[in-house]
Amino acid sequence: MTNHTTGWNFDNSYARLPHSLFTKLDPTPVRSPELIILNEPVAASLGLKAEELKSEEGAALFGGNQIPDGAVPLAQAYAGHQFGHFNRLGDGRAILLGEQITPSGDRFDIQLKGSGRTPYSRGGDGRAALGPMLREYIVSEAMHALGIPTTRSLAVVTTGEPVYRETELTGAILTRVAASHLRVGTFQYVAAWGTPEELKILADYAIERHYPEIRSAANPYLALLEEVMKRQAKLISQWQLVGFIHGVMNTDNMTISGETIDYGPCAFMDTYDPKTVFSSIDVQGRYAYRNQPPIAAWNLSRLAEALLPLIHEDSDQAIEMAQDVISGFAALYQSDWMAGMRAKLGLFNEEEDDQSLFEALLDMMQDHQADFTNTFQALTFDTLEGSSLFRSPEFLEWHGKWQARLGRQQEGTEASHQLMRTNNPAVIPRNHRVEAALGAAEQGDFDVMRRLLEVLSTPYAHSPEQKEFANLPPKTTIPYQTFCGT
């Protein structure tokens, strides 16, 4: 497959970094790659020709059987605190083909996930199953449509080979598109096992790639920490505002770019409960919904530790400077979350009692086991029926306070409703809908998934066609669980 016909335009800046950061390695070929789904809008944004990619050669590329001209395949090394425990890690089943330079000059990593064993596989088979790869495709595309920074999914192919977990499953490979795959864990890896020079090279690379505006800062490495913190505070607030639970917020899953990455045991909350956990392996609730903001701060502290030698030559001063930055996370997050909550409730200005107004609503939602998304949808369109929440005396009192609060701003009712419509999605990837799509796909029926993706692509449309996808799952006594899918 030539670049001339498909539009591939690779650069390989990561491959020019110190070799301790990666291992050059081709993907392991598969038996018979078959294209299951191609994200044509993403392909177009990358400058790729979708029709060419739908060919057998396209499937061979997405399966790792062919390497496009200009690519320098490699597996990245990194470390990470996994559930609080520090480990030496790396791309155990992923290969970075290179960086696609788009017609507008933007740079995106192109990575094959499930492409075979690497030196970092730690006993794993390097492969992936169809269900988890389609889950990442569905949820990452839903996150993008919601306006939340995320990696994207370009394609999924089946491999013609089984993978074995608890049972035999259909093998698959996902092609992931990312601003980069630089992680907090990448810096931890170099800080633990690299040299001071390598740490500086990595930091300079991150600044050049993601934060070029801070190159001339008085202390660019302290500024790097602060900029990553700003993006992560904003990102986590956006997760919280739509009820998204990542499920595995290890430091190797926190990006320097501020994108959501790794959709293993992720899920969206139905019934509002801050203690909600979906991941089967998170038995202590470390990454529960309510813990996501403090865990983000904890992860950023690990980034700060890695950067200390660059922040100041005196370790005590470096620690003090880094702590001053990290101490600002809570206020940043709170500001972002408050702004988001104001938008969800149609508020344009700020008042001192806003936080208590928001928290009172959430407390009532928890007490009445109200659905997170549908409650805000009902407030948006004033369809206050069906839930015991809306019949309760405490809600009626709250509703009066909210209406009075709306009345104390210059913007009119229609402006408030429009603000709410653009900040309260009609649909999210409901867990039972995702499971239905994955179950059908594993039986060879991809129409259910395609219909779901179509509905999720415009979450703020509030169209009649979306109503059935806002329906809650049948009641059950069995808690919903997600699995890493490794």
Image (spheres, rainbow, N blue to C red):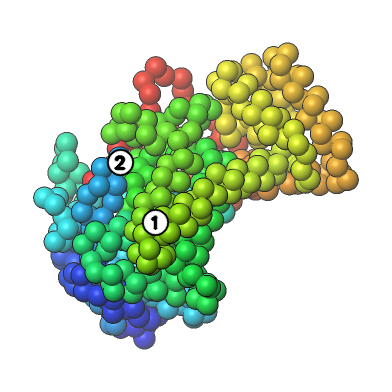
Provide the residue designation for mark 1.
316
Which residue sits at x=69%, y=29%?
A: 356
Vertically, is 147 above or below 52? Answer: above
166 or 191: which is nearer to us? 191
Q: Quadrant of the N terminus?
A: bottom left
Q: Position of residue 252 (x, y in %)?
A: 32, 53
Q: Which mark is residue 149?
A: none
The single residue placed furthest to the left in the displayed view is: 123
Tell me, yes or no, if residue 98 can be seen here.
Answer: no
Tell me, yes or no, if residue 399 can be seen here.
Answer: yes
Q: Please tell me in which quadrant of the rendered image residue 267 appears.
A: top left
Q: Please tell me in which quadrant of the rendered image residue 390 appears.
A: top right
Callout 1: few (<14), some (14-19), or many (20+) C-alpha neighbours within 10 Å? Answer: few
CB atoms of marks 1 and 2 within 8 Å: no
Callout 2: few (<14), some (14-19), or many (20+) C-alpha neighbours within 10 Å? Answer: some
Amino acid type, callout 2: Gly
Which residue sits at x=51%, y=53%?
A: 324
Q: Mark 1 or 2, which is nearer the eye?
A: 1
Vertically, is 443 above or below 259? Answer: above
61 or 75: which is nearer to us? 75
**Cα distance between the residues tagged 1 and 2:** 24 Å
Q: Please tell me in which quadrant of the rendered image residue 246 appears.
A: top left
Which secondary structure lies at badge 1?
helix
Provide the residue designation for mark 2.
84
Amino acid type, callout 1: Asp
The single residue placed furthest to the top in the displayed view is: 393
Q: Position of residue 408 (x, y in %)?
A: 87, 38
Q: Position of residue 363 (x, y in %)?
A: 60, 23
Which secondary structure lies at badge 2?
loop
Which residue sits at x=49%, y=70%?
A: 219
